[in-house]
Image (cartoon, grey):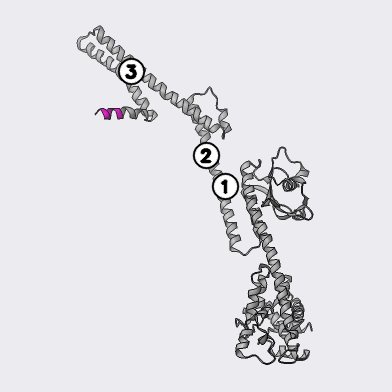
Amino acid sequence: MKMNIKLKLASIENASLIRKFTVLFIVMSLLPFLVIAYLFTQYTSSSTITMDQNTLMRLLFLTGFGALAGFWGIRKSIIKIQEVTRQTKEALSKNMPDLAKIETEENEVTQLARTFNEVTKNLEDNIKRLEASKQTIQYVLSKIALGVSSQHTIDTFLELIVEITAKALEAKTGVLMLLDEKNEELYVKVASGFKDTVKNLRIKVGEEGPGWVAKYKKPLLIPQLHKLKPEEENDPFVPPLLSVPLTYQDKLVGVLAVSGKLGGGNFGEDELLILSNLASQTAIAVENERLHQDAEGTYLETISALAIAVEARDHYSRGHLDRVSQYAVRTAQKLGLDEQIIKDIKDAAELHDIGKIGISDDILKKESALTEDEARIMNKHPIIGEAIIKPVRRLSSLCDIVRHHHEWLDGTGYPDRLEGGEISIGAKILCVVDAFDAMTTNRPYRKALSIEEAKRELKNYAGIRYDVKVVEAFLSTR
């Protein structure tokens, strides 16, 4: 029973304000009310009030004690409200300057109400910022998903980085500049939000904001201190400017910079940290790409050497690659193909027989007709050729032409027995010009045909083996 009383009394300390004030009001008002009720009962029953001195003293003591206890409890509650108000103001004033405007002469309830109004406003602002951040994250993820799902080069990756960075930091412009070590200059690799003229911009190391960053390999944060003049608005690096170095193992790779704020204001330390972290990862990607290009260059030189070696093995086919390349380019131009397709056809023509490096001399130089098994081995050279050039990313567009330059329209070619529309225009062109050069060149097992005989052969098989339009375009160049 005693334990229950203690629990109930203790619970008042942790009760709500309304409960505390209710209990304290009862303590302050109940005893006086009981005394008055007692005196009134005596008066109505006997028309007189009789009370000895001791009883009167007890009633006065109890009444005074109740009033004092109520006053003390209410005062204690008000002091707690004042303390909560003070602590709330102190905790929030650092991030909410408007709280300092609250008048000290206002009562505590008003102060507390205004404080929480400010808190509510601050929360609403945070919700808006979080919503904006959510939209930015969705935008970033969609862009990354698009970049990952497509076969892109380092250029498109860097474009994605700059675009996302400018968007995330609410910058008007973003630029990624790489170092030209020979000339000690920075040149624009990727730009977002600039006019096209900035793409040709070059900055000496040590000059302007990015140049300073490149020289000292330190980040630079320049706030906007005054309203921009008309002539300053076209400056690509006008404040507010945030610029950080791209470094890999303490080696400068370039500079990443953003400038201008869409919503006004300046960049902060948090944004500087974000850009610095992003720059370090971008520097690794750029350096890895450079190393990859060096490796690819070495591999490409090896492939070119292999192509020359193939021709050197067979004196009957010397000059074949150059002739086929010339024939193919003229035919493609006659057909009005795109310049990039023509370049791919030219490069494929120069490498189309590289797979013969994997064919033994016994088969390659045999002076009589090949057996069925030998022909099957020889017919694998387009597959071998594709496998050789496939690791080189810049040669990926040549793989189809190299693999299918022996496919015929009727599906009797090799290695995949493609038919008609399944064969690319590049492979169709190479098939015609390769066959023509083979027919007009001496071989170990037969003598060369004349030009006219070879032309008749192409016409006879046009629409069967060879594409009619390709044959007509090629013959018109002869």
Q: Amino acid at mark 1?
A: Ala
Q: Amino acid at mark 2?
A: Leu
Are the two marked residues, 1 and 2, in contact with CB atoms closer than 8 angstroms?
A: no
In the rendered image, residue 254, in percent from the top left (x then y), is placed at 71, 52
Q: Amino acid at mark 3?
A: Gly
Residue 470 appears in the rendering? yes
In the rendered image, residue 442, in percent from the top left (x then y), is placed at 75, 89
Lateral position of residue 368 relative to residue 110, left or right: right
Q: CA distance from mark 3 to mark 2?
A: 44 Å
Which quarter of the picture shows residue 466?
Answer: bottom right
User: Which residue in the protein does label 3 denote?
Assistant: 66
Is residue 455 placed above or below 306 in the rendered structure?
below
User: Which residue in the protein does label 2 denote?
Assistant: 123
| Magenta range | 1-7
Residue 463 appears in the rendering? no
User: Which residue in the protein does label 1 denote?
Assistant: 132
Q: Earlier in the sequence, mark 1 or mark 2?
A: 2
- Front residue of 195/302: it is 302
Q: CA distance from mark 1 to mark 2?
A: 14 Å
In the rendered image, residue 151, in percent from the top left (x then y), is placed at 62, 65
- Front residue of 400/309: it is 309
Is residue 424 placed above or below 219 in the rendered structure?
below
Q: Which residue is painted at 38% across and 30% down in the image?
A: 16
Q: Regarding mark 3 in the picture, which secondary structure is present there?
A: helix
Q: Earlier in the sequence, mark 3 or mark 2?
A: 3
